[in-house]
Amino acid sequence: MVTLTGHTLTFSEVMRVLYEKEQVNASKESLKKVADSRKAVEEIVKKEKVIYGITTGFGKFSDVFIDKEDVEKLQLNLIRSHACGVGEPFPEIVSRAMTLLRANALLKGYSGVRPIIIERLLELVNLEIHPVIPQQGSLGASGDLAPLSHLALVLIGEGEVFYKGNRVPAIEALTKEGLFPIILTAKEGLALINGTQAMTAMGVVAYLEAEKLAFQSEVIASMTMEGLRGITDAFDEDIHLARGYKEQVEVAARMRSYLANSQLTTKQGEIRVQDAYSLRCIPQVHGATWQTLNYVKEKLEIEMNAATDNPLIFNQGEKVISGGNFHGQPIAFAMDFLKIAMAELGNIAERRIERLVNPQLNDLPPFLSPEPGLQSGAMIMQYVAASLVSENKTLAHPASVDSIPSSANQEDHVSMGTIASRHAYQIISNVRRVLAIEAICAMQAVEVRGIEKMASITHNFFKDGRKISPSITEDRIFSKDIEQIATWLKNSSYSYENLKPTIQP
């Protein structure tokens, strides 16, 4: 059981909830703070104080006072009017993360909602009722208004959900689980949608997949080193200590570990003096990606436990302040940085693919073809990798450098952080396919060299990979191989303690 406090949620706990479906509850202490904060909202309504979003309209309508008998209607109208997201829905795992993170943010006790709101969000997580949330429509400031409105719809019995493998009306899933729609009262609608949980949830899932892929890229690169008889002197610890980047040192250490006892790699001067950059500079390039991943993880861990709505209630209602914690700039920058780092991981992998298939750059069969000329072998797989990395260059354009005014210029600077997080996820998916192509080509190359001479770890990877993508003995529809290897990589987990791949069923 993962207990949320609003302050202590970790990546490890998020992984358990998202992927292992661990149950979640809220700490009693946090719920008490929530209840105290709620009393302050009720007092504001009772005394008809002018407080944004509680007794006023929203955005440009912030100067319009709302009578206390209309506060429930105000919140309902807010959710319905703001639920105008478009496009394909977020992956179900992202919707699950969004619901979890919104509950955790409200548990901080600064938002003025009733405890039942948080309890219902956690029930959705525990019962695997995941809101259908369109991906497009958020500016990444004023909160992820459109996406989170689609999440909030479910609490009032409207909208759609993913439930037991089907996409159904929310009220149908709630009824089957014995849950009733909630009537939102003062500030609750605003508290549900004024936050960064769409970009953060997408960012968390993107980060977790990126981290796994970064480890996998090193194993695949190690197999490429064997296929090309690469020089391992470039991974000597002294070289990397001399520069001083921790992540670079760690990548080099893992490469040495992966290639330990290989009879296919070489030393400088045995065949050639030095390798091309795509082999020689693996620790430097991959290490820089790891630096970025560490930065992204740090920002996401802060945002997962942040109060991001507006206004915020302090000192049991003695201080209610309108601010801008809903602005997604920190996550927008982090996601743009993630996009660039992962795109580069794909770029260098594509260059290794070229070295594996180009007969002018190696002594392997041209394009790894079983019958060069009659059969094309891996020729067009390199084209696909080149296409994917080129597409990534477009997607890697920073979303955070853009802004556009909204709400009659009241909200005149926005982050575009949700766009950045969505594009980061697309890039990661593309890079996974590039690495799948590198894996297919590297497996073919080491077969030519002699798999009995492979290192123990890369040989284990080779054996598992060959169960999915057989040896190229004749041309076939390689699209299937690429997608199957990419799916395998996505569903795989790695034991970092012994650096050996283990495959989940």
Image (tube, rainbow, N blue to C red):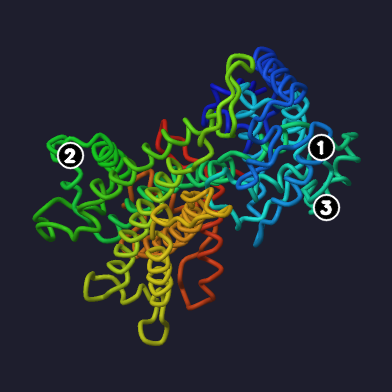
Specify which label sits upstream in the sequence, 1 or 2.
1
**Mark in front: 1 vs 2:** 1
Quarter of the image where one finds residue 277? bottom left
Q: Using a 10 Å C-alpha cutoff, classify the residue at mark 2 as few (fewer than 14 neighbours), some (14 to 19) or many (20 or more).
A: many
The residue that disc 1 covers is 70
Q: Which residue is depicted at the point 66% across and 60% down?
A: 86
> In the image, residue 22 lies at what x, y percent?
67, 30
Indicate which disc residue 240 carries. Answer: 2
Residue neighbourhood size for the residue with mark 3, other residues' Cα within 10 Å, grouped as few (<14), some (14–19), many (≥20): some
Spatial CA span between label 3 and label 1:
31 Å
Q: How far across and down, in percent of the image, does residue 411 sit? A: 52, 48
Considering the image in quadrants, where does the C terminus appear?
Answer: top right
Residue 164 appears in the picture as rendered: yes
The CA distance from mark 2 to mark 3 is: 54 Å
Q: What type is the residue that disc 3 sits on? A: Val
Q: Is residue 273 left or right of residue 57?
A: left
Tag 3 secondary structure: strand
- SS category of the residue bearing label 1: helix
In the rendering, at what x and y percent does residue 269 appear?
A: 8, 55
Residue 460 appearing in the image: no
Query: Is the C-beta separation of discs 3 and 1 under 8 Å?
Result: no
Q: Nearer the viewer, mark 2 or mark 3?
A: 3
Q: What amino acid is found at the position of numbered circle 2 in the picture?
A: His
Q: Position of residue 373 (x, y in %)?
A: 36, 86
Q: Nearer the viewer, mark 3 or mark 1?
A: 1
Q: Which residue is mark 3?
A: 168
Label 3 vs 1, first from the N-terminus: 1
Q: CA distance from mark 1 to mark 2?
A: 66 Å
Q: Residue at x 41, y 81 (%)?
A: 376
To which quarter of the image does residue 181 belong? top right
Disc on the earlier residue, 2 or 3: 3
Quadrant (top left, top right, bottom left, bottom right) of the N terminus: top right
